[in-house]
Amino acid sequence: MNTETIELTLGRIGMNMEEATVKKWYKSPGDSFVEGEPLYDIETEKVATEIGAPFAGTLVEIVVPEEGIVEVGGVVCRVSQAKA
């Protein structure tokens, strides 16, 4: 079984959302996670949201640190996903 590194980007959660602040990381590089498990929290002008893992994998690299700002479509972190 090999792994594939994937960049997770910030999705738009509100119509007028252009950017968000990463408020908290629940995982550190090297930590594994399961699908749906919280990875990080973001905050926009209007809402705070917990972002869950889209699949099971391992956090490889945090691109945007806590209190860092990321634009919609920007890379937040890199993860690896096991491929059969």
Image: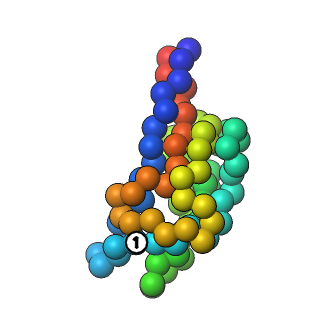
Dot 1 lies on which element?
Answer: strand
| Residue lying at 46% horizontally and 38% vertically, measured from the top left | 6
Residue 24 found in image quarter: bottom right
Residue 60 found in image quarter: top right
Establish if 3 lies above or below 75.
Answer: above
- In percent of width and height, residue 31 lies at 70, 41
- In percent of width and height, residue 8 lies at 45, 48
| Residue lying at 60% horizontally and 61% vertically, measured from the top left | 65
Foreground residue among 27 and 35: 27
| Residue lying at 54% horizontally and 52% vertically, measured from the top left | 63
Establish if 6 lies above or below 16.
Answer: above
**Crowdedness of circle 1 by 10 Å Cα count: few (<14), some, many (20+)?**
some
- In percent of width and height, residue 73 lies at 35, 58
The residue that label 1 is drawn on is 19
Q: Spot the residue most to the bottom.
A: 46
**Residue 35 as seen in the image, left or right of residue 17:** right
| Residue lying at 62% horizontally and 56% vertically, measured from the top left | 38
Q: Quadrant of the N terminus?
A: top right
Q: Is any part of residue 35 visible from this angle?
A: no
Q: Callout 1, which amino acid?
A: Glu
- In percent of width and height, residue 41 lies at 58, 66
